[in-house]
Image (spheres, rainbow, N blue to C red):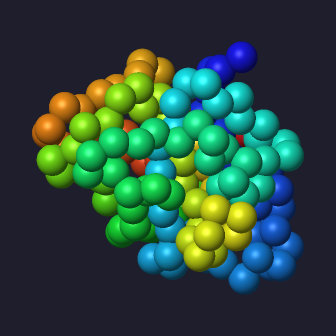
C-alpha cells in the first residue's frame, strides 16, 4: 500500500479533545516533516513520528524530523474550523520523492513527537539544489465541518 489520502491522526486528536496531551494546535511547537510514498499511514493507530519515520525523506538541506511549522492558527466560522500555518520551505535542498508532509507536536524526539496531520501531495515532489516549498491551500491545512 501507499499514501492515498490526507488525514488527522485520531489518537492525538482524542488526547487534545480530552486535554491529556497538554498541547494546543495554535502553539508554535510543531514540526513539518516529509515522508515518501512507501509509508502506509494508519490514522487509527499511528500516534508518534517514529511510526512513520522509517519512510522520512533525506537529502541536502533537509533536517531529520523536518523543520518548525510557523504561524499556526485555528479559526472558526459558520460551523467550520480551519487549521492553517505559514507555508514551509527548505532552501537550497535536494529532496527526492516527497509524497506527504507530516505535522507533529515537537516532543523532542521521534518517539515523543505526537502526530497531528498528514497532507498528501498526490504526486511525489523533488528538488535539486533549489527551494522545496509546501504551499498550503487557501482553505488551510485542514478543515473540520461541525455542522454536516
Which quadrant of the figure has residue 97? top left
Residue 133 on image: x %, y %? 26, 43
Q: Is residue 82 visible?
A: no
- State the residue in front, 111 or 21: 111
Report the residue at 47% width, 29% height from top.
99
Residue 18 on image: x %, y %? 85, 73
Residue 38 on image: x %, y %? 61, 25
Count of numbered badges drawn on the protein? 0
Q: Quadrant of the N terminus?
A: top right
Q: Is residue 6 visible?
A: yes
Residue 3 on image: x %, y %? 62, 25
- Horizontal side of residue 5 vs 111, given as left or right: left
Report the residue at 23% width, 32% height from top.
127
| 141 w.r.t. 41: above or below | below
- State the residue in front, 5 or 45: 45
- Horizontal side of residue 16 vs 120, given as left or right: right
| 4 w.r.t. 137: above or below | above
Pick out the residue farthest to the bottom.
22
Which quadrant of the figure has residue 39? top right
- State the residue in front, 143 or 117: 117
Report the residue at 70% width, 29% height from top.
40
| 38 w.r.t. 51: above or below | above
Q: Quadrant of the C terminus?
A: top right
Which quadrant of the figure has residue 66? bottom left
Amino acid at each position: 500500500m501507499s499514501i492515498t489520502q490526507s488525514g488527522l491522526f485520531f489518537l492525538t486528536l482524542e488526547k487534545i479533545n480530552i486535554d491529556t496531551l497538554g498541547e494546543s494546535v495554535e502553539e508554535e511547537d510543531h514540526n513539518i516533516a516529509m515522508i515518501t510514498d512507501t509509508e502506509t499511514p494508519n490514522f487509527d493507530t499511528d500516534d508518534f513520528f517514529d511510526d512513520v519515520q522509517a519512510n522520512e525523506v533525506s537529502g541536502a538541506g533537509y533536517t531529520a524530523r523536518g523543520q518548525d511549522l510557523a504561524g499556526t492558527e485555528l479559526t472558526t466560522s459558520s460551523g467550520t474550523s480551519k487549521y492553517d500555518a505559514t507555508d514551509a520551505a527548505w532552501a537550497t535542498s535536494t529532496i527526492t520523492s516527497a509524497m506527504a508532509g507530516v505535522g507533529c507536536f515537537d516532543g523532542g524526539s521521534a518517539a515523543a513527537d505526537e502526530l497531528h496531520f498528514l497532507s498528501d501531495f498526490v504526486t511525489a515532489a523533488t528538488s535539486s539544489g533549489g527551494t522545496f516549498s509546501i504551499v498550503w491551500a487557501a482553505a488551510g491545512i485542514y478543515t473540520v465541518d461541525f455542522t454536516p
